[in-house]
Image: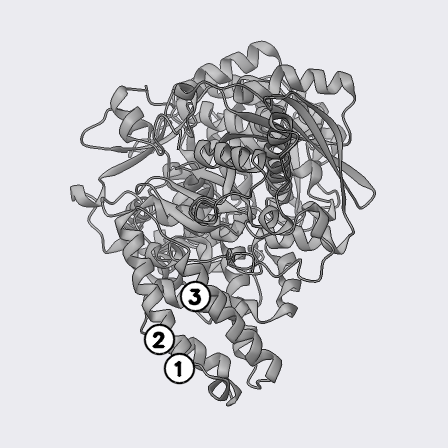
Amino acid sequence: MRYSANEVEAALTKAAVAKCYPYGLATDIAAAAVLLSAYGVDGVRGALDAIVAADFSLPDSAGDAGGVGREVKDTADKIHLHDCRAAALGTVAAELALATTKTVHCHCVDSPLLLAGFVALAAGRYGVSYQFNVADSCIEIPECCSLVEIAELSAGSNVLLKISATSATTPLRTTAGGVEVAAQDWQTIQMLAAQTYVAATAESRSQGAGAGEIDND
Amino acid sequence: MSVANASTNNTSTVIAAAEQMRLARIGSFFPTRLSFMRTLLRYLSNHQAQVTRQVWNINAEGYGHAVYTVRVDEQDYSLVAFSNTLADEQRSDRVVAESWDSTYALYDGIPDAAEIERLAANVPLQEGGRYNASELVLSRANKSVRFFNHTVEQLAAGKQPDHALMISIGYLMRTTAVYGNGKFGIADRAAIANRRIFQPPFQAELLAVWLIRIFTCDLVEHIACTRAPQTAVTLTARNRRFIGIGNATGLGMAPFLITHPLLLHQWVDTRNRALQQVLQQTVSTPEFCQRVQQLLLRAQLHLQQWSVADAIQQERIVVLRAEWNAIIAQVTTDWLMRPSARQRLYQQVAQCSLECQELMIALLLETEEALNALTTEMSSERLFVMQPTMTVAQLQQLVRDNFSWALMLDYNDKEQSHWFWYVSAEKLEPRLGDRYQIAGSEKEQPLDIARQVKELSRLLSRLEGADKQQTVAEFLLQQPQLRYAVRRVQTQAHYPYSEVQDNLIAAACRPIDLLRFKLSFFGASKFDPKSDLWTRITLFQGAPTAETLQAGDADDWWLPVYQQAE
């Protein structure tokens, strides 16, 4: 069924918040999913699978893997992100590649597609192109066909990210026509989103919002 | 490499953000010529828009459906209106209402019978229906029972509505929600943002409301005429023009302002740049003097006709009336003809109430037609972009420089963390709760920007030595929960008017200030607060009707006043 991009983005943000993702990350997850959909791949499913797999949790103070993976700066030119859960680390992986001169190595990525969504989002925001190296392929992002190719990669892939150009050649697509979402996925999103709502009480109904309950003047 | 947000090059300085963006000041704003309703009607007027009533299938009691079409820029937009029976006990302005006196969709084109049938099955259900991208706006309105019935009775008896009710109410129906941008499946803003008419903010939504106003006037005339065909009259052109559309606005508007910081900046910055342009002019012409005096007197009459039950607002109005009368007494033609009259008018109110200061700003903007060109700068399609290359030392400096107002507060003090904003499971109504009394604060909406920035500051202050030179991207790898706060701080550095500089979870926070701020940009007047949480307002009062769009005074309706026929 078709939903507007705004509906999908708002609902996915809530769904991610329900899975304990910080709001600032949740909005990026939703934006990446909608962007992927504009390229003809099921970004909503990709994002949903990634956030449903496990609740988000903060990295612990010891720098252990925790909920979001582990950073190891083992050489002068590489940053390693182990157990790379795309929903948690995808956006910062793309930003790390931008902010440093290092190559970002994402190990055992649970959703290469969602990671690619974040990378495409960053490419659009910052006007750059990325090299998305996986297996023996070097894929340029953003490119329409490359995202379709990435959609076929399986979980557990290792990805190397680096900036390849400082001005993007391809403007990002938009989803002005809306986004197709499978009925089951939409149901799951709504169920998660509902967890962010506060149960109604008579007190909240009478005191928490505006206007009288009857307005016949 | 350097990656930066595109900042506005000519950010205004006439009122500093630290003063401008306080709740008390933005809660005193008035509509201006840059307001979105004015922008819309100027566009319709300048582009020779034509309105036709395509369908009128309304019975003698006033129930049924109608279709109005606006043709502009060789495109058609149709308001599909459904008028329904409604029991008194069901009439509520709240989001939680389930049925309404009337419901509407703004349709992209002219709907055929099958489309009207589809809309008839959905639009009266509002949030319970499902819509297509062919619908641009979804809305509903309830009658002002007193004024609607009174007007029907008066017209049926061959009379016009009572002028005291015209002034005190001034609308036949009030909208209780106007949905755009993809809600419930309607078109996303991105789908229509490249059409010139819809480039400024909220133009599709306001087009729908303007057409609803036409429908409400037609509806009372129709009921009166069928009730008493021998004696009934129609509304005079003057009354038709004065009658607006009421609106009940609650908390839903507040989160929008916080989640659209760049738009917020754009609105305020453009308004301030307009003021700056006015203040740069030093020469007075006789026409300018005449215009200022005309506007001073209009505002005076408007204030006389603006009375509300809310004690706080009424007291502010009383003070404002006195201040305004004093200004009028002083500002003679000679006074205005002396050099730098605009600057002196602006300085004249410096020690007055915020309401008076803001009313004078709105008046000064009204004197300068050339400012209309700035309305193209009121929208922002830009994104809220992180700057991952910034060092944390730089970030910390931005926090210190721009968020001292947030850092000075103690959020462990219950007074500073009293409220939490939330979405109720009951029809997703936005609500505000006492954190220490009501369950659910763990699900609060992220409107606590001040508190988040203070937490960011606390963690930044723990970093030492080389860690201070790490990039924001590296910092957020370890502290992902602070991503939103970092983004707010970075955004505010480039867009100084993007942040309301008050604690929105403090016990002292009055959400009504946020509502008035946003509604003033819509062009609303006669703010009528019913509590700290909601207000009634009037939209399009005094605005041109479909028949008077091309009239010479089509853009001269700042602060509407009702004057009895001579």
The colouring scheme, among rainbow, by chain, secondary structure or one colour, is one colour
- What is the total number of numbered labels drawn onto the structure image? 3
SS at circle 1: helix
User: Which amino acid type is marked by label 1?
Assistant: Gln
Q: Which residue is mark 1?
A: B330
- Toward which corner of the image does residue B403 lie, by quadrant? bottom left
Give the side of residue A43 with respect to residue B415, left or right: right
Residue located 63% across and 27% down the image: A4
Q: Name the subunit of mark 2.
A: B
Cα–Cα span, label 2 and label 1: 6 Å
Cα–Cα span, label 1 and label 3: 14 Å
* Residue B280 in the image: above or below residue B251: below
SS at circle 2: helix
Badge 2: residue crowd in 10 Å (few <14, some 14–19, many ≥20): few
Residue located 71% across and 28% down the image: B134
Instruction: Return the mark for residue B326.
Output: 2
Which x, y percent locates residue B323? 34, 70
Q: Which residue is mark 3?
A: B300
Q: Are marks 2 and 1 in contact (CB under 8 Å)?
A: yes
Which x, y percent locates residue B142? 49, 30
Earlier-in-chain disc, 3 versus 2 = 3
